[in-house]
Image (cartoon, grey):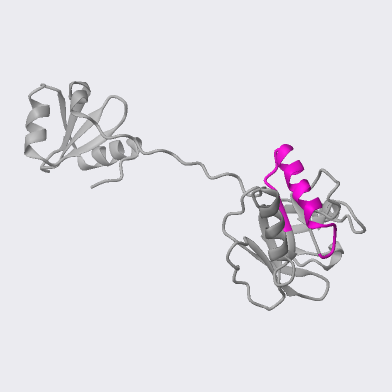
Amino acid sequence: MYDAIDVNELPQGGDLYAGYDDGNWPDADSIAARFPGKEVLRITVNPADNKGVIGDGPPDNGTWPEWVQWVEMRRAAGEDPWLNTNQQNNWQAGKDAFAAAGVPEPHWWVANYDGDPALPAGALMKQYASNSGYDTSSCAAYLPGIDPKPVVIPPKPPITLEEIMQIEVWSIVGDDRVYAVHESGKMLHINEPASLESILATKPVQYKVSPQTMDNLKAALGYTGS
């Protein structure tokens, strides 16, 4: 990620950009216009402003109690906010302020221009290089409050013996592998003779198909087993 107070200083090729939406250098809109299609993180310098996803905290702006209140205000507005501060001199004081207030910490973007992009424990972004006219930050692969929330698809539950009356049996011509396909779309490789015997005793519909047809069936049902 690149950030600057002068949009013209920013290089091409950033995954993310950051700019101010208030204060003396409100350049976020200009950055968005120069880099269409790129995510531009908006930085707020005034803890009284109910805007932005990142607060530019002490030592440059405001006090830690004010930024604790800003974080609560932004959460009430539906944001998952961040704060930016100096890693070595101010970060611990900020963490202490949230602990004293009994407020969960925000996500942290810390500054330490040591040339090392490695993220310190507890921070998800780090300004590690101050170049001529702009800063460079390393970022975690997933940035909460910035990236879309990952979608978790729960696994399909296994087929139970109580469901065997509702299945079809599929096998490949010339292959001893047998599969049970439940009407809900679940597919199970039957590799135990006793289980197969129990299923066949229910006289299910049975199919013997070509390898290509079986591959097509597996693909359609999302089956990834052998």
On the picture, is 135 further left or further right than 179?
Answer: right
Residue 7 visible, this orientation: yes
Give the residue at the far bottom of this rendering. Answer: 114
- The x and y percentages for residue 10 are 79, 66
Q: Residue at x 83, y 68 (%)?
A: 9
Locate the N terminus and report the quarter of the image it occupies.
bottom right
- The x and y percentages for residue 158 are 27, 35
The magenta-colored residue range is 59-83
Q: Quadrant of residue 83?
A: bottom right
- Asked whether 91 or 18 is in front, the reply is 91
On the picture, is 106 further left or further right than 20?
Answer: left
Q: Is residue 77 one of those drawn in magenta?
A: yes
Q: Quadrant of residue 153?
A: top left
Q: Quadrant of residue 11?
A: bottom right
- Asked whether 202 or 138 is in front, the reply is 138
Give the residue at the far right of this rendering. Answer: 24
- Asked whether 193 or 11 is in front, the reply is 193
Residue 38 visible, this orientation: no
Q: Is residue 103 one of those drawn in magenta?
A: no
Give above or below for 24 relative to 77: below
Give above or below for 89 relative to 96: below
On the picture, is 116 further left or further right than 30?
Answer: left
- The x and y percentages for residue 8 are 85, 65
Q: Residue at x 31, y 29 (%)?
A: 185
Give above or below for 28 relative to 72: below
Q: Residue at x 24, y 38 (%)?
A: 214
- Number of marks present in the image shown: 0
- The x and y percentages for residue 219 are 33, 40
